[in-house]
Amino acid sequence: MSAAIALIAVSDDRSGLKTFDLVLLIGGGIIAALVAFALLNFVAGVIWFAIKFIFVIAVIGLIAWLVVGRRK
């Protein structure tokens, strides 16, 4: 028997992400960022509305207390 060099078949398939997978990954990241931004905007809006509402109620209460307090 003669010594032969064994050649390992090398596939042409690339390991890693394919183009479509990369597009889906980037698109999903963009969508997730937009949803997170919208959620943060909503939460900040609700908190800001609550702060303004409490301030307006406090001002109305202060004015009512001053008006009623001066009558006595």
Image: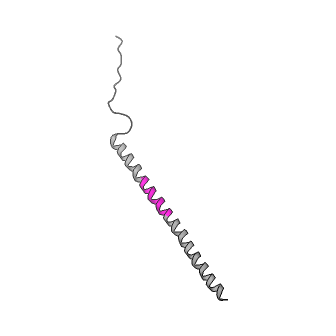
Point out the residue furthest to the bottom here: 72
At horizontal 42% and vertical 55% (from top left) the residue drawn is 34
Q: Quadrant of residue 18?
A: top left
**Residue occupying the point 60% across, 82% down:** 64
Q: From what the image shows, is residue 50 above or below residue 29? A: below
Q: Quadrant of residue 68?
A: bottom right
Q: Is residue 33 magenta?
A: yes
Q: Nearer the viewer, residue 9 or 36?
A: 36
Q: Quadrant of residue 7?
A: top left
For residue 2, above or below residue 56: above
In magenta, the rendered stretch is 32-44
Number of dots carrying numbers: 0
By secondary structure, the bulk of the magenta-drawn segment is best described as: helix
Residue placed furthest toward the right: 72
Nearest to the observer: residue 70 or residue 31: 70
**Which quadrant would the C terminus be assigned to in this image?**
bottom right
**Up-down: is 14 above or below 56?**
above
Up/down of 28 relative to 52, above or below? above
Q: Is residue 45 magenta?
A: no
Measured as percent of width and height from the top left, residue 53 is found at: 53, 72
Q: How is the image coloured?
A: one colour
- Image spot of residue 15 (x, y percent): 38, 34
Image quadrant for the N terminus?
A: top left
36 displayed left or right of 71: left
Q: Residue at x 63, y 82 (%)?
A: 66
**Where is residue 41 drawn, in percent x and y?**
47, 60
Q: Position of residue 49 (x, y in %)?
A: 51, 69
